[in-house]
Image (cartoon, coloured by chain):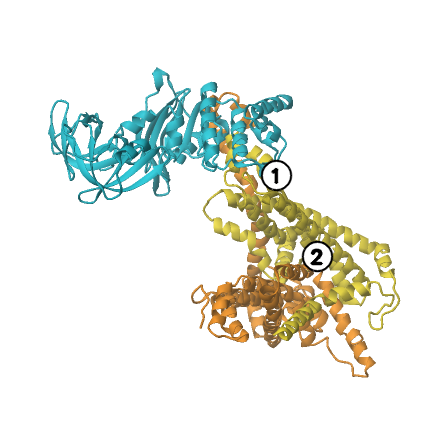
Chain colours: A yellow, B cyan, C orange
Amino acid sequence: MSYKRHVLKGYVLLVLAFIFAPIVVSFVFSFSQNRFPTLPLSAFSTIWYQKVLDEPAFAQAFGRSLTVASFTSAIATFIGFGAAYVDYRYRFFGQRVYVAMGIIPPMVPVLILGVAMLMFLSQIGLSGALYSVVIAHVVLCTPFSMALNRLRLSQMEPNLEAAAWNLGANEWRTMRMVIVPYCLPAILASVFITAAISFDEFAIAWFVSGLEETLPVRVLNMVARQSSPSVNAIGSFTFTLSLTLVVLAQLVLIASQRRASRSGPGT
Amino acid sequence: MNGKGESNGGREALLEFVDVDKRFGRTLAVSNLNLRIGRGDFVAIMGPSGCGKTTTLRMLAGLERPTNGSLLRDGRPINDVPPWLRRMPLVWQNYALFPFLSVIDNVAFGLRNEKVPKADRVRRSMAWLERLGISSLAHRSPATLSGGQAQRVALARALVLEPEVLLLDEPLSALDANMVVRMQSELAQLQRELGITFVYVTHNQSEALAMADRVVIMNDGKVQQVGSPLDVYRSPDTRFVAEFVGTNNIMDGKVKSVAKAKVTVETPLGVFASTNPSSAAIRPGQSVHLVVSADMLAVGRKRAPGHANTVAARLVGESFAGNIVTLLLEAPGGFELKAQMQHRTLQDLDTKAGDEVVLTFESGDALIIASSPAG
Amino acid sequence: MQGHDLAQNGGKAAVAGGRLSHRASRLGFRLFFGGPLVLWQGAFFVAPVAFMVVMTFWSVRNYQLSPDFTFSNWHKILTEYYVWDAFLRSLIGAGLAAVLSTVISFPCAYYLGLKASPRVRLLGACLIIAPFFTSFLVRAYTWRTILGDQGIVNAFLGWFNLGPARLTNDLFGTVVGYMTLVMPLVLLLQLFSLAAVDRRLIEAGQNLGCSPLQTIYRVIVPAARNGIVLAAAFAFVLSFGDLISPQVLGGSNPPTLSILIVDQVRGGLQWPRASVIAVMMVVTLTAVVAAAMRLAYRGSKDADIR
């Protein structure tokens, strides 16, 4: 009985090992002096990190990724929040189609989205620039913002908004003084998560950005051309950055959860 | 059926519903509502779940718009006035305190909307917190409050605005029994001191009867009766009110004869006389309800001479509620009756379950309510 | 603001002239918050996809794209051998990925979802979520260094004088890539489904004399069927559209549909033809997902205990 259980546990570890193998290996080899990552391990060195930090092209690409991620995150969070609120508060004709527009994009293969966006945007002269990437990323990320905010709104005390109106706040004031403060954990979470998604997204960016490479696109081009261990360094960088963003989002959500669960009315 | 509530002492109506209907999809939540609420009144709207009382309150607050009819304030229609301009703060059943604001910020919320300067906001809010005995909670978070404390914060938040009208939606329903009693007397006292018009919705009749000047009984979207607590308790206008308020015995029957002051009614339990018909005209042969309040039924061991209205019954059970005991009795034909008396009286009677007893009631204590399709 | 000023008139102006501005303000409110989604997604999601369908009927003459209504693109693509070859390759690759990931993930999800303590389950879930926030690109590339001709595995084999194994530039590499892409998602979905299985059903099965294996086959899998099928469907969709795995780990030749699309777009600007292939992909995926949904939700909602 217990030997079977051990086997099962071992299996689980094996599966997890498969999942983490590339992550761990990449991390390890980012510190390896040898240009060609292979066994046996060569000396410990931070040369590749140095190279990444020194080369202006990387810094540029990184900067572009940050720019795109920031704008995407801001726009997608706003649109997603607004859509979630409208879905929460109103009943209207075509509501299902409305919601569908807000959740379908991530289900379409990124490749197809990228191609479609490239063709459409270049026809209307909006492709080949960083804002093209922003446009496309917002399409992809808005659903996440909408889902997060919709969830948070569904947890709100049903009369909270009405209470604010009743006390003299019109719709705009209520939004500013009640709805937004209440939804702040979800808004922050969606800022971080949409930024993380945009930062890592390469397929659409590759199609649409033309010569203005974002970081993942640069990596993609490098990978296509040659083996470069700098990629490992970049990979570790972006992993750490994304992880930080996600952990921050989690902390914000957990903190608001804890405040709410200190039981009592009026939450 | 009296649908209009006249205000006390000739004071003009502050709020008035005129022929108001409210429809949700196909359901008629409120129909043909005509109601006047005077300045300084404490009006309780009472009824079972789904009777339309909360919808009525929400229409006052502007959270629902009447489908037909007008809602008037000082004679002017306010159907189209949005909730934030109504100046009728609501004390919510679940308090609806803003969880991300401290207690004092909650209380000051409405003042902020009126652009009252900060110093005044703080001063007025603190004053109300002190008045309600919760000033020590000023900087706490709502999540840390008990039910009674949160209720008072909700109250302070509404009253700090010094409104003409205060709306209350079952504010005590989430509190435990001793808190309820305390809050009831506090609320009644506040209303008297401030002279504010209170519109209070509840499904609990003891709350309504204890606190209100006027009680509105609703069922199924319609007003059944409007009157003082005593009126509604002692002189129900409809069968529903007789069933809903107090403990009444209701017998269905036909009018046998109508004399100057006395009406006799034939019921399955016998023929009874009443000198207390309702205001509607009574004709012989008409279907009516004969209503006798449980505390008007006297219980005796044997038939006493000289009483016109008697029923023989068997004692089936007792329901003991402190000082008052409710006796459950079964009359011939399986008809259930209830009698209420003081515990002392019961002890003097010395009866036990299964005993045969004789119930009597005065003709002046028997009410006649006309039967109508709406009850 | 507007609403507030009117309030200071005691509501009188609200009745007189304020009504119109109330309505306008409230409409503006709704449009401000609800409008952007329609505008943005309409213009940048619905329109591009619709445009892509239209594009399938355009023509390219002398490297010039021109609006047209011709079936020549469809004809060309649908009659080419290499297109169907790529289609089959994509289909088989994605199918393998779906089946393999489902089968491989199941015992792991079973343990974490039903056998492990809640703490371990949470830890497991966190570990599984972590890869979502790494770059898939980097992970795929790293697999290439691990599996490559001069990579870690071959270096390791070389110590034992075992011949170099060709692990990349063929189907094996591609499938490893797909697995890297979809396993976390499949694991997660299966984990949630299995953890949500009503324990009483399991107990009933054991009560009726099922061995652990039989319990899995006859009780648990049917109960979690929806989640398992859904996960497999996601795995299929993701793999079918992936262009990294076949390129980085599969050697690009012979190509999959995804690579074909990229080729058509990059060399020769054959957008109409690329669109045709893209539409083919979407139709295929829709059919597969629809079939999967029917498979998942057919029959009663409760698990059958056969």
Q: Residue at x 77, y 75 (%)?
A: C153
x and y percent of residue C140 in the render?
Answer: 72, 67
Tell me, yes or no, whether dots 2 and 1 are on the same chain.
Answer: yes
Pointer 2 indicates a residue of which chain? A
Local crowd size for mark 2, using a 10 Å CA cut-off: few (<14), some (14–19), many (≥20): many
The answer to whether any part of residue A120 appears in the image is yes
Which amino acid type is shown beneath numbered disc 2? Asp
Q: Nearer the viewer, mark 2 or mark 1?
A: 1
Q: How many angstroms separate mark 2 from mark 1 (CA)?
A: 29 Å
Mark 1: few/some/many CA within 10 Å (<14, 14-19, 20+): some
Say which quadrant the C terminus of chain A sits in.
top right
Q: Which residue is nearer to you in this view: A81 or A94?
A: A81
Relative horizontal placement of residue C21, taking residue A22 as reference (left or right) = left
Q: Is residue C87 visible?
A: no
- Of all chains, the one bearing label 1 is A
**Residue B174 location in percent, x, y?**
47, 38
Name the residue tied to disc 2.
Answer: A200
Residue at the spot of label 1: A181
Picture quadrant where residue A197 is located = bottom right
**Amino acid type at mark 1:** Pro
Q: Name the residue: 77% across, 74% down.
A: C148
Sooner in the amino-acid sequence: mark 2 or mark 1: 1
Measuring 46% from the left and 44% from the top, which residue is drawn there? A91
Q: What label does residue B362 carry, if any?
A: none
Which residue occupies the foreground of this view, B196 or C275? B196
Q: Identify the secondary structure beneath mark 1.
A: helix
Where in the figure is residue A101, as x and y percent of width and height? 54, 52
- The local secondary structure at tag 2 comes to helix
